[in-house]
Image: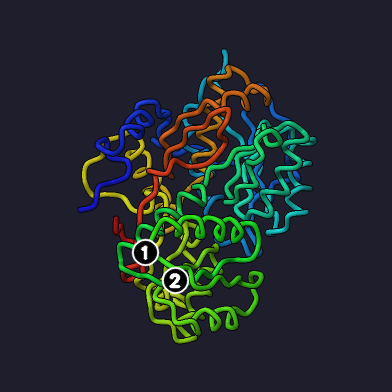
Amino acid sequence: MATSAFDSTVLTRRGVLAAAASTLLLTACGQPGQRPDDAAGSRAPDDHELVVGASLELTGPGAALGVLQQRAMEITAEALNVSGFPVGNLRRTLRLEIRDNGSNPAEAARQVTELIQRDQVHALVGGTLAETSMAIVGVAQQLRVPFLSLADAEEIVLPLAERTYIYKLTPDAGDVARRLARLIESLRVRRVALLAAEGLHGDAGVRAVRTALRTTDVQLRRTVRLPATGSDFTAAAERVAGDQPEGVIVWGTAPDSGAAARELRRAGYRGPLFFDAGAVADHTLTRPYAAAVEGAYTVHPACLTSSTLATTTTAEEDRRDFTYRYLQRHGSFKGFAPYASDALRLLVSSARMATSLDRGRIRAFLQTQVLEGIAGAYAYAETRHGGMEPDSLGVYVVDKASWTRYA
């Protein structure tokens, strides 16, 4: 049986992370955070509330990822609010102000401006799409409010001198690409094509894959960019399949990942598929795409599946409890990285250490956080604002419409 990425025998640095991890536990249910349509009832925070504003893609092209992160936030907020948490000389509770940005960057920027100025939130979370996150970055940095991004693109946290209030939770594209490159080489695949999404997420993937493959015997034969989400992917898939590669890397996010896989199969490609972490959402394994993605590989945070062995770490216990509560509420859990859950934990830990809800102090202590979270491990520093630790990643394969640990 494969070893869990959170097992105490894993890399030494992980042992340090586990020892320093937050001990916040998902141990009971409380009252839910505020729902997206509660904006009319927004209010300024009182002395006992840590208020977190979230702009998420609950509709539009990013909904396949955004809705999952909303659920993760609500489950974690409920657990944290059972007994509250100490900040300074008061015991606080967490209040969520969640907004649906409709996958629109301009709307995301408008929402967070309102959340900061009218609702006086202490911190921001959101942007599962790189473009919406980048729109939030500009507002958060200008108004000096800590922002934890749920999207994947180096530009979110770089250049660091211009991103002092900005942090990222997703794995770095380079770490994912290197793990994919090693996997592809181990499978003796020697000629690959890259099918990458349009936009910042795809840009990061193209750079990372090209760099990672240079250290292997794998040749990148062709790079093709997917058109915008919701477009016809047939032409792009046919261009890739026409080169007869031995393997195809699909670097995108759900729902595009499953749609691209389907079009590749329709174009006659029968070889292995390799996804980045953005593919992992319930949507990818649904009936329209299930046959096309069967047998596909992905590199993803190791929270995707849980071992049936007894728990050995607080993080593993927390993850099991999170999964149990998710199943209770939503009926099924096909696996994803609940970055938003870890974002709340990081903010609560920072506020506790800061002994204050002051935005500047929360920001200052965010860059000292070492956390073994639900999705993975994080070790922020003044010189590093993202993302997840590389050894939090695992390799998975789709087996009978489920993600199964491969390595």
Callout 1 secondary element: helix
Picture coordinates of residue 274, whole percent (x, y):
42, 66
* The quarter of the displayed image where residue 164 is located: top right
- Residue nearer the viewer, 27 or 316: 316
Q: Amino acid at mark 2?
A: Val
- How far apart marks 2 and 1 lie (CA) works out to 9 Å
Picture coordinates of residue 281, whole percent (x, y):
48, 61
Callout 2 secondary element: strand
The reply, left or right, for residue 391 in relation to residue 77 is left
Report if residue 333 is visible in the image.
Answer: no
Coloring scheme of the render? rainbow
List the residue tagged with mark 2.
Answer: 192
Q: Quadrant of the C terminus?
A: bottom left
- Residue nearer the viewer, 20 or 119: 20
- Residue nearer the viewer, 104 or 201: 201
In this picture, is 182 found above or below 384?
Answer: below
Q: Look at 49% across and 44% down and name the residue there.
A: 75
Report if residue 257 is visible in the image.
Answer: yes
In this picture, is 37 found above or below 13?
Answer: below
Q: Look at 36% across and 52% down and name the residue there.
A: 394
Characterize the local packing of mark 1: few (<14), some (14-19) or many (20 or more) Cα atoms within 10 angstroms: many
In this picture, is 235 found above or below 24?
Answer: below
> Which label's residue is closer to the chain start, 2 or 1?
1
Which numbered tag is attached to residue 15? none
The reply, left or right, for residue 168 in relation to residue 134 is left
Q: Are marks 2 and 1 in contact (CB under 8 Å)?
A: yes
